[in-house]
Image (spheres, coloured by chain):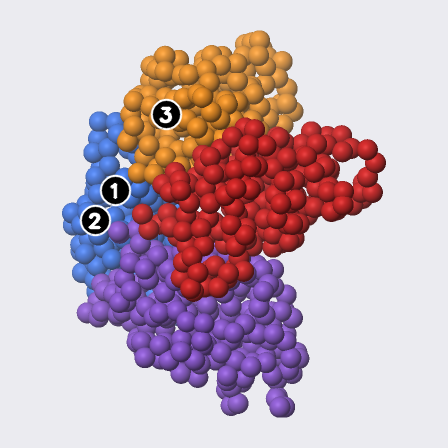
Chain colours: A blue, B orange, C purple, D red
Amino acid sequence: MSTDISTLDLEEAGAVLAAESARFASFGWMRGTSGNLSVVVSRDPLRLAVTASGHDKGELTPSDVVLVDGRGAAVNGGKPSAEAELHARVAALTGAGAVVHVHTVASVAMGRRLPGGILFKDLEMLKGIGQPAHDVEVTLPVITNSQDMLVLGDRLEAARDPRMPAVVVAGHGLYVWGDTPRQARHHTEVVEWLLELELSGH
Amino acid sequence: MSTDISTLDLEEAGAVLAAESARFASFGWMRGTSGNLSVVVSRDPLRLAVTASGHDKGELTPSDVVLVDGRGAAVNGGKPSAEAELHARVAALTGAGAVVHVHTVASVAMGRRLPGGILFKDLEMLKGIGQPAHDVEVTLPVITNSQDMLVLGDRLEAARDPRMPAVVVAGHGLYVWGDTPRQARHHTEVVEWLLELELSGH
Amino acid sequence: MSTDISTLDLEEAGAVLAAESARFASFGWMRGTSGNLSVVVSRDPLRLAVTASGHDKGELTPSDVVLVDGRGAAVNGGKPSAEAELHARVAALTGAGAVVHVHTVASVAMGRRLPGGILFKDLEMLKGIGQPAHDVEVTLPVITNSQDMLVLGDRLEAARDPRMPAVVVAGHGLYVWGDTPRQARHHTEVVEWLLELELSGH
Amino acid sequence: MSTDISTLDLEEAGAVLAAESARFASFGWMRGTSGNLSVVVSRDPLRLAVTASGHDKGELTPSDVVLVDGRGAAVNGGKPSAEAELHARVAALTGAGAVVHVHTVASVAMGRRLPGGILFKDLEMLKGIGQPAHDVEVTLPVITNSQDMLVLGDRLEAARDPRMPAVVVAGHGLYVWGDTPRQARHHTEVVEWLLELELSGH
């Protein structure tokens, strides 16, 4: 299969993802080699740059990146994480340009306490995900984990709320998305802040 | 409307605010793009330099700053946050030379637990806001949030205690002020420390 | 006793251990001068480079390292920690190429709460120690502390689970191992994450 | 009163104290401008270099230091904190070469919970303050705060346990000492670790 993404474009995407990963790793949200980040590099056909599997997320280089198609399969070689399939599905489903997957303690702890979803209301921080601070109730969905990315994607699709650019995967972590890597970063920070607030209140 | 503040003065103010913002961002108190900082650059007429809206508070440059008047309106262009109006009001009301607005988890968590205000006494740290450590009881007021800055300002004016250079906005965050950006920083650190202490005791 | 390990090899090992130690120290996991790290530099005879005792673990230099044999005794001079004996035993027992010993609050707090061992299941993070996320229950053993490294080693040998590359020493801290210093780091981060999750849930 | 301490010696002491202060500030243990550090520069007559009052403890320079005598009074000008008197008394009383005073949340929170003193036993970390890990019970004394340094010093003298190089001042913070600034740092880290452990278990 041919593709228009040049090696140069891919390395530029890899440099952005490496910087974003190092930031999240410094927060302790990508312990071990956990989590992965992606950015859409072409929409039609759908192509994403995804961080390579198995690396320390605080030590990625611009070349630690794999180009995948809409099913998460490698286009030009390399070994993407199985989760690349879910990144691609989130991008196709939501129109997001960037997807963040991190393993935070607060997301797993809160998913365990509130497996039916985590409700937020009357919080100014909701404006950080494009919602009004008042007069809305927004739920962060919690879905059951699976090693089958098709099953996990179906659950995400069924559970997601268009007003909330994130889903908690129980016993696993957080998926968050945005138009760009920077917006996805900000959405991730906002959702994690909301989770830490709820965690402190129990 | 003319003003005496030169572009150079404004950039110098912007450099100070960028450095202070980066510090608070590193503490996790400005997640997403939340919060904003200001410094008074002229008192008569009242003019404040306020951090520009929508930026990552760890990545501001000296030019990411807007000059506003006493009602929080832009003087020479740029798009201030709606909250610039409250910064201006705090500066006018208290005589403060700098205002800090941050979104800390502890302030929102404690505002939820004690919506009537948070009482501190017998704490040496109170000296950091100019109070004696003993024989006083100082209350950190908690006010209800509003998107109307006039309403929010009225609440702040009605609730504030001259001995406490800070107010918690429920479901939102913390406003703190001081004579200079450095003093406002220290007041912010002291108030947040007090909140974290109370949070650890519940 | 002669040995094939050159001074150069030892300093290279020391440089790796100094960098790993500085990382763990920045996490607050090596407060005071606590903890020590090792890497196997030869397998037959067994030789380990171990961080020197009594130094600040955030300030090690490549020469702050001691070469020890399979009983933890210094081969070419220097003063290893008494715990070097346990590092050597872990390396011999498990085949690990690197051993991490850190003093984390979460490991001692959880060892106190669950002295019979800490059970994990249905957690994606378990993949970070080579286990499936589902359909397994993995226990992090907790062993009683001792100043006698032979006794402590016997307890570790009796308690360890081959699926879990770590043991909590009650009232003391965490031993973790891996094929390389980097894998041992990742295992340490994963085990600590699991402990912090359990701690947040009580 | 003449003294043998040269300006050069004092600046060298100031450089050490500035570096130690910046480290503690980065841990969040010197919020606002709280806390102060000292090092003994002569024993007979007793002279200490103490960090200057009112500065941000993350931004000290080598000249932000004052030389004080055994009663905490400035020898060559400058304005020491009132607490310099207590530093001098600790140095005279214990023979310590360096004193650390920090405001940590854990020390004030635990002093509030256990105003009669905080007992530690069966903790390997006790070796970091020169105690055996087992078969001892060591108490971290908690004394009532006072603005009168003579009163506070009397309480410290009456309460202190020679086996514990630290005292909690209720509603205030932590005094810790050691032979050198580095040992005082390590003692501080150990005592704070012990306090954080106890705080996590309640």
Name the quadrant containing residue B152: top left
Q: Which residue is mark 2?
A: A113
Tell me which residue sits at (28%, 30%) in the image.
B112
Contact (Cβ within 8 Å) of mark 1 with mark 2? yes
Chain name for mark 2 = A
- Mark 1 vs mark 2: which is more N-terminal? 2
Q: Which residue is mark 3?
A: B119
Q: Nearer the viewer, mark 2 or mark 3?
A: 3
Out of A124 and C94, give the one closest to the viewer.
Answer: C94
Out of C197 and C34, give the one closest to the viewer.
Answer: C34
Horizontal side of residue C126 vs C188, given as left or right: left
**Viewport quadrant of the N terminus of chain B:** top right
Chain name for mark 1 = A
Contact (Cβ within 8 Å) of mark 2 with mark 3? no
Q: Position of residue A56 (x, y in %)?
A: 44, 63
The CA span between labels 1 and 2 is 10 Å
The CA span between labels 2 and 3 is 31 Å
Q: Please, is residue A189 above or below residue A124 in the view?
A: below
Q: Nearer the viewer, mark 3 or mark 1?
A: 3
Which class describes the residues within 10 Å of circle 2: few (<14), some (14-19), or many (20+)?
Answer: some
Kind of residue at badge 2 = Arg
Q: Position of residue C1 (x, y in %)?
A: 62, 90
Q: Position of residue D69 (x, y in %)?
A: 72, 37
Q: Position of residue A94 (x, y in %)?
A: 26, 47
The CA span between labels 3 and 1 is 21 Å
**Viewport quadrant of the C terminus of chain B:** top left
Tell me which residue sits at (51%, 90%) in the image.
C44
Q: Please, is residue A65 above or below residue D168 in the view?
A: below
The answer to whether any part of residue D72 appears in the image is: yes
Q: Which residue is mark 1?
A: A202
Kind of residue at badge 1 = His
